[in-house]
Image: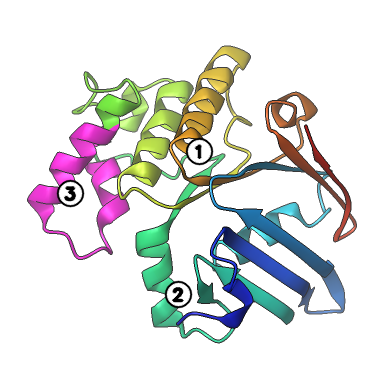
Amino acid sequence: MTGAGMADTGVALRLTDVVKEYTGGVFALRGVSIDLRRGEQVAVVGPSGSGKTTMLTILGTLERPTAGGVFVAGHDAVKATDRELAGVRAHEIGFVFQGFHLQEVMTALDNVATGMLYTGAPAHERREAAKIALDRVGLGHRLTHRPGELSGGERQRVAIARALIKGPSIVLADEPTGNLDSKSGAGVLDLLHGLAAEGATLGLITHDSNVAESFPRRIQMRDGEIVADERQ
């Protein structure tokens, strides 16, 4: 389902006057409007409770807004059904989280292959794509290792491989370096910037100003509102 709000084909993600209210009158977002263009690299910074994670989950169609417009990869995410949004996530969006979210009983190969689980691809294609993705992030020699046998940086690279296995047009990352040492974190950022250089739109949230400084565009949030939007 496409929407008129995405008539500009250069826009990958758009929020228009988005409000998110939770039970008890708690507002996580207060009239947020933003465009992320295709291939753009954007860091969203702000303290805990500023609304940045809520904005990312709405951009990723994991939550719906209380009010306002949301357009993702040409789809009207407010009018779309849950089934249609699941299709958008399966084909267009790759997620990278701080906590890795890997299955401990599965090998790196099988963890990455789950990134294509809802695309309809057969198992042998998913596993072959997983091999390619792991090789791309420098873990071609770790295919049979389980998460407990990998370092924190390696686990995050497995998570990135899982996100990129389907060739998403949009990559959304939530504090992806938060659990890593500085060297591992820098390697993860290099991988994410590389994805964007190949054409994917990258949206990353962080509380670390040093991480944000590596992005050409930085959005600062406070109390559910955008208070600054800077470009290098």
Residue 90's disc is none
Amino acid on which disc 1 is placed? Ala
Say whether residue 20 is visible. Answer: yes
Q: Residue at x 39, y 81 (%)?
A: 83
Residue toward you, 185 or 219: 219
SS of the residue under disc 2: helix
User: Is residue 65 something one can see in this rendering?
Assistant: no
Which residue, given by chain and number where applicable, does mark 2 sit on? 85
Question: What is the three-letter code of the residue carrying label 3?
Answer: Arg
Give the magenta-colored segment's residue range.
Answer: 107-133
For label 1, count other residues whose C-alpha is less than 10 Å away and answer few (under 14), some (14-19) or many (20+): some
Q: Residue at x 63, y 31 (%)?
A: 178
Residue beneath the point at 50% across and 70% down: 74
| Residue that mark 1 sits on | 196
Q: Which residue position is annotated with label 3?
A: 126
Q: Residues within 10 Å of mark 2 (few under 14, many from 20)?
A: many
Which residue is at the front of the view, 75 or 147?
75
**Mark 2 or mark 1, which has the lower sequence index?**
2
